[in-house]
Image (tube, helix red, strand yellow):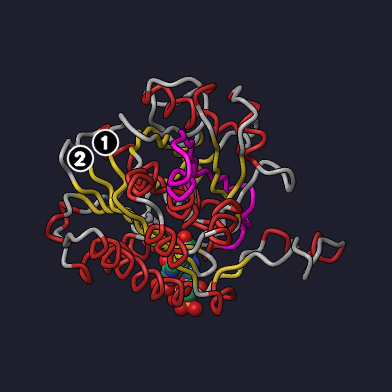
Amino acid sequence: MWIQFVCVHTGILGCDLQTAICDVMSPAMSKLTTPSMTTSVMAAAAGGHRAGGSTARVRFGNHDWSEFIDTTDEWITSRTGIQERRFAADDEATVDLAAHAAETALADAGLEAADIDEIIVATDTPEAYTPDTASFLQHRLGCREVPAYDLGGSGCAGFVQALDVARARMMLEPKRVLVVGVELISRLMSWEDRSFCVLFGDAAGAVVLGPEGGQAEILDVVAGTDGSKTDILTLKTGGTRHPFNEESLASGAYHRLDMDGRRVFREAVHRMSGAITDVLKRVDRSVSDVSLVIPHQANKRIIDAVRNQLGVTEDRLYVNVHDYGNTGSATVPFALWEAKETGRITEGDLVALTAFGAGFHWAAAAVQF
Ligand code: UT7
């Protein structure tokens, strides 16, 4: 019991360990394993299109890219389904988008910053190298001196993994946890690498988890990692193995993400459909019970392949990658908010969230509205 307790407190929680903890916790404690959730997201600050829902300010279509680099609208649309993405304005950085999303989520939940007991930010594009974005966000929002930390480097799976961590933290103590997924990939990527830059956009999304009274209940979350595949999606420069130096600066390697697109594609399909199957099994439900699947929005072809593997009809799958591109760990909370705002989710719906990302990580959550 003692070892399990310490492990949970670090916030580094694997799913087998989590299951073990559930098994030994008292029935009273296990009541806390279904935190309720109030969702709301926003990206970018002033200039948003409607209250609570827009991504970053600068809209950038496929034709804009074709004026910059050797690409075409036809290539991008047919290979990815992406037609447009938004980029943060020059005067915005990660915490600006994160704060906007968080404030919108708090308002939606009818809460103040002072009501939040813990903050987790999932991002690969932090405000600064150190400290973490969550520290900046805590101060910006005016929260109390509560624990705040990032789940960084886990790519686009970060937000759903963060839900898992938040949920585990809430098993120990009923608390309100703010979970944010935010990405300003436009600041990190090479604007000349056509096989990469056309895929991405900037955004943020946030949810507030609490012990009761929310709009939805997280029934369960599964997560996993295959660390033998770190090479298929990685930004090496800047870490201790490949530190920043004059050479990396001169060559532009500091923003060169290495990606084996085809392997990422295959893994993504396999892991996202597997994770949804697993999480539904754990809550004793089947795919036919799911009203809406919200997958990570990386590529329409990946989403279609997941749909085929699961046997889900098109109307039960949420897609907005054509409007925003891949916004990393923000895609799932943003799509969740948009689906809710546009009436695609109503009371009584079972919603399945899933994501994958560099690591190679994957995760899925079953959420009952
Ligand atoms: O959140 C996780 C992030 N990453 C992903 O989800 C990526 C997963 N993978 C994919 O989405 C797809 O593999 C890509 C969209 C990245 C690429 O699609 P693909 O069908 O696998 O194309 P490819 O990499 O095999 O490239 C085909 C061709 C190449 O030319 P050659 O060698 O056949 O002459 C590329 O150089 O397309 C070329 N190409 C482009 N052409 C025009 C690559 N990018 C572009 C571009 N415009 N932007």
Residue 195: give x, y in percent of width and height.
Answer: 52, 65
Instruction: Give the image quarter of residue 74.
Output: bottom left
Name above or below for residue 107 compared with residue 311: above
Residue 242: give x, y in percent of width and height.
Answer: 78, 69
In this view of the protein, which residue sits in the foreground, 319 or 359? 359
Query: Which residues are the magenta region?
Result: 166-193
Name above or below for residue 192 compared with residue 45: below
Q: Which mark is residue 340?
A: 1
Residue at left 33%, top 57%? 81
Evaluate if marks 1 and 2 touch, with contact meaning CB atoms under 8 Å apart: yes
Residue 316: give x, y in percent of width and height.
Answer: 17, 52
Total marks in image: 2
Q: How crowded is mark 2: few (under 14 residues within 10 Å), some or many (20 or more)?
A: some
Amino acid at dot 2: Arg
In this view of the protein, which residue sits in the foreground, 201 or 296? 296
Q: In this view, does 79 lie to the left or right of 306?
A: right
Q: Residue 344 carries which label?
A: 2
Residue at left 37%, top 70%? 271
Tell me the quarter of the image containing the C terminus.
top left
- Does residue 360 show up magenta in the picture? no
Name above or below for residue 306 compared with residue 187: below
In this view of the protein, which residue sits in the foreground, 243 or 207? 207
